[in-house]
């Protein structure tokens, strides 16, 4: 699977993505009603989340997987949204901007120098969508609600 998150490339020789798990949930909040079941208050769309999982072998091919993993760790701490792109046989999918919220890795089969021969990584990303389309959708949902307060004396 060929993917890019900002300047980080997930390609077969370096650090390929083997599993992509995507989730989204609506933002709803129950509103209590006396004598009846709570109704759901619709707050708008929730954040979309991705989990990318991969296994790579640092000594195989060009050996840059550990360097990229170090860069991904820095990006998690920087909280900078980067564009996510996925290329497959059907074309290119542009997912928009995403922030890495966590990266977890397991390094196994260590050699005499302590270098891992196999690294398994799980990275979690959350969509950081500030696009006009999402803003317009939220405005449309909220447009019918009057938030003004009138005080009558």
Image: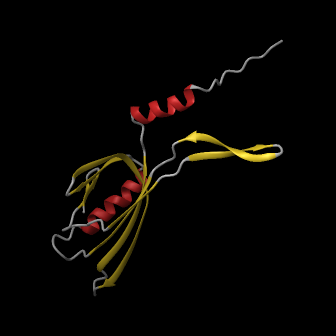
Residue 14 visible in the displayed image:
yes
Along the line of sight, the residue nearer the viewer: 142 or 100: 142
Residue 132 quadrant: top left
Extreme residue in the left direction: 61
**Residue 16: x, y in percent?**
26, 66
In the displayed structure image, the side of residue 67 where residue 74 appears, left or right? right
Quadrant (top left, top right, bottom left, bottom right) of the N terminus: bottom left
Residue at screen point 77% across, 16% down: 151
**Residue 146: x, y in percent?**
64, 23
Q: How many discs appear? A: 0
In the rendered image, the vertical position of residue 82 relative to residue 88, given as above or below? above
Along the line of sight, the residue nearer the viewer: 104 or 85: 85
Residue at screen point 28% across, 68% down: 66
In the rendered image, the vertical position of residue 127 relative to residue 67, given as above or below? above
Q: How is the image coloured?
A: secondary structure
Quadrant (top left, top right, bottom left, bottom right) of the C terminus: top right
Extreme residue in the top direction: 153
Residue at screen point 35% across, 73% down: 120
**Residue 31: x, y in percent?**
72, 43
In the rendered image, the vertical position of residue 119 relative to residue 38, given as above or below? below
**Residue 101: x, y in percent?**
45, 56
Residue at screen point 22% across, 67% down: 14
Residue 9 visible in the displayed image:
no
Residue 33 quadrant: top right
Residue 115 quadrant: bottom left
In the rendered image, the vertical position of residue 133 relative to residue 27, given as above or below? above
Extreme residue in the bottom direction: 112
């Amino acid at each position: 699977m060929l993917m890019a998150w900002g300047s980080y490339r997930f390609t077969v020789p370096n650090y390929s993505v083997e599993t992509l798990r995507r989730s989204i949930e609506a933002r709803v909040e129950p509103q209590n009603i006396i004598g009846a079941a709570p109704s759901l208050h619709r707050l708008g769309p929730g954040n979309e989340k991705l989990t990318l999982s991969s296994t790579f072998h640092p000594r195989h091919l060009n050996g840059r997987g550990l360097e990229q993993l170090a860069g991904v760790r820095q990006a998690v701490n920087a909280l900078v949204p980067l564009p996510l792109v996925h290329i497959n046989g059907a074309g290119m999918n542009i997912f928009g901007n995403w922030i890495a919220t966590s990266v977890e890795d397991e390094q196994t089969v260590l050699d005499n120098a302590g270098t891992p021969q196999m690294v398994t990584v799980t990275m979690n990303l959350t969509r950081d969508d500030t696009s006009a389309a999402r803003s317009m959708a939220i405005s449309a949902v909220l447009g019918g609600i009057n938030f003004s307060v009138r005080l009558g004396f």
